[in-house]
Amino acid sequence: MGIYVTTPIPADLDQVSNIDWDLGDGSAPALHARPLVNHFYRSGTYTVTLTLTYVTGEVFVVTKEVVITLP
């Protein structure tokens, strides 16, 4: 199963210096990824973490559990 993730909205991209993803699947974190495509090959619950670093130095971290169910 492939998942396409992207953030922030295009109008805000000039305010963001880094977009880093940790998909919680054991793969290396995707650094400076805009947009990102990932494939999950096993069913399970994954903790996905997005880290946004703005040009002002502010850092925002968003974590979400994603449940993948494959046939």
Image (cartoon, rainbow, N blue to C red):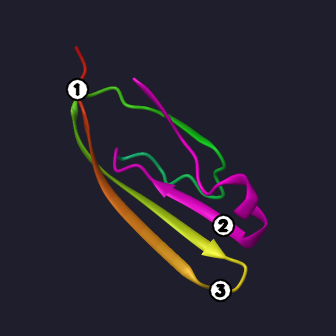
SS label for mark 2? strand
- Label at residue 58: none
SS label for mark 3? loop
Quarter of the rendering occupied by the N terminus: top left
Earlier residue among tags 3 and 2:
2
Specify the amino acid type for callout 3. Answer: Gly
Percent x, y of residue 21 = 50, 56
Give me the residue at 79% from left, 66% from top. Answer: 14
Gap between marks 1 and 3 measured at Cα: 37 Å
Give me the residue at 34% from left, 26% from top. Answer: 41
**In the image, which residues are magenta?**
1-25
Check disc 3 and report the residue beneath it: 57
| Residue lying at the far top of the rendered structure | 71
Q: Residues within 10 Å of mark 2 (few under 14, many from 20)?
A: some
Gap between marks 1 and 2 measured at Cα: 30 Å
Check disc 1 and report the residue beneath it: 69
